[in-house]
Amino acid sequence: MKKKPYLSIALAAGLAVSSFGAPAIYAKPAETPKQVQPFNVFDNKILNKINVENIYNNIEYLSRTPRVAGTEAEHNAIQYVKQQFESYGYETELQEFTFYGYTAPHTVELTVDGYSGEIKPKSFTYGMDGTVSGELVYAGLGQAGDFEGIDVTGKIALIQRGAISFADKVLNAAANGAAGVIIFNNAPGDLNGTFGSPNDAYVPAVAISQEVGQALVDQLNNGETLTGSINIEGADAGMRTSYNVIATKAPTNKNKAKDGIVALGAHHDSVPGAPGANDDASGTAMTLELARVMKDLPTNMEMRFITFGAEELGLIGSRYYVSQLSEEEKDSFVGYFNMDMVGSRDAGDLVINTPDGNENIVSQTAQASSARLNGESTPIQPGGSSDHVSFFEGGIASGSFIHRPLEPWYHTPEDTIDKISKEKLQDVAEIVGTAVYDIVRPENQGPKVNRGKEQKVPHLYYEEEIK
Ligand code: BES
Ligand code: ZN
């Protein structure tokens, strides 16, 4: 990462126009007469207030535990974020929404009498609890025809992965009277699978490796009788509740109340087992700090500081948020700045992901601020996979700030506070904070809101080259 350079006067002069064409005023040159610090005075209103220790300490607090959407831990994080916003003086709303969720079982056991090796069974997402035992019967790929000529009634069907879905294999076995199912991988290694959706017709099922599955098939082919026992406890599917936390700052210039809305935010939930220090306690803590920094600054637009729930389950909270906006709100929404994974010492450089790879007011103002602060503008890269997509789909300009390539700890139990870089946090907070302030400051007459068309993102799950 770059230290802030002193730019030459020529370059600074080139930058001496704010992103909306209004003239910007720069700080006086420092001691060296030929060099000038390229910040404008408005940037300094943000830069002087950011305290990276606040961000770091809030990440440390939030990342003491995983914060899976709909769990008590997420609800505790939500209360904490709300209290922090309120301690800065914000009116804060909890926006409730519900979704269908699944909790993985705490106990997944498989024993096979007559097999001596280690088995390490896994459960399937949306699989059900149960304790069953019975003779093992090999049922090939578990397609309907595979059950002709074999009797699995009250027994455990041993099925290979492939050709049809895991769910259909289990449903076919259940339809033929099987008490349980073991599915083994068709490639080396463990099998972690999902049934895709819940179904009361499933029977208890476990996944095992190709190596163990093939060994069991070989023993059966040798004429041995094997008896298996499956025990699954703690799986729980059903409706869950989560919340978006929304702190609002009214425009200080009351005459300008209808000029626009600018939002910045992050998701506060994490994946199971991951403390999510970087993903995304970092963005949540940065949202809090920028809210604190901007609390008493004069602005001509409404600002919304938002942390979203259930992002990791498919952008559920942010989609709900956008779905609840009125036409009038959408018409006046200028842009949404998303911060997701903004502090890992082990990730690459900062990029701005926009869902279609095109620039918009979020990317433009952040490119301008990064050029002013660091002498180099943060590159744009097409990318989805976070809450900015929900805004884009609602026709609202958005961008997500993230360091790429990702750190190796992404979505693992190792995503912890010790991997967080204060330098990276400081850099992103400065770039985003000054970009946002450039839009909302009262000196700025403001851009015309450019409401986009509502559209689906074509490539949510694949990546392209950095522009
Ligand atoms: N923090 C990530 C965002 C991310 C990950 C962006 C990888 C770019 C690359 C986010 O929380 C996440 O994990 N998103 C999901 C997708 C989402 C729609 C459930 C992902 O990328 O698997
Ligand atoms: Zn994330």
Image: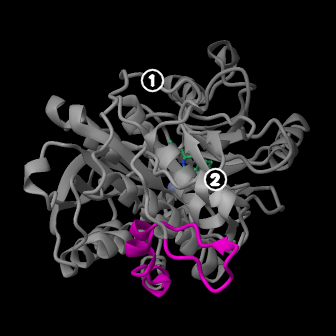
Would you say residue 33 sits in the magenta stretch? Answer: yes
Instruction: State the quadrant of the C terminus.
Output: top right
Residue 168 image offset from top left, x and y in percent: 56, 24
Q: Label for residue 76?
A: none
Quick one: 37 or 268, which is closer to the camera? 37
> In screen coordinates, is 105 left or right of 9?
left
Q: Amino acid at mark 1?
A: Lys
Secondary structure category for the residue under label 2 = loop
Q: Which residue is mark 2?
A: 378
Where does the magenta region start and end?
27-56
| 15 versus 417 height, above or below | above
Instruction: State the quadrant of the N terminus.
Output: bottom right
Q: State the residue at coordinates (73%, 57%).
A: 113
Q: State the residue at coordinates (70%, 57%).
A: 406
Quick one: 277 or 396, which is closer to the camera? 396
Choose top left, top right, bottom left or bottom right for residue 153. Answer: top right
Mark 1 surroundings within 10 Å by alpha-carbon count, few (fewer than 14), some (14 through 19), many (20 or more): some
Mark 2 surroundings within 10 Å by alpha-carbon count, few (fewer than 14), some (14 through 19), many (20 or more): many
Q: Label for residue 456?
A: 1
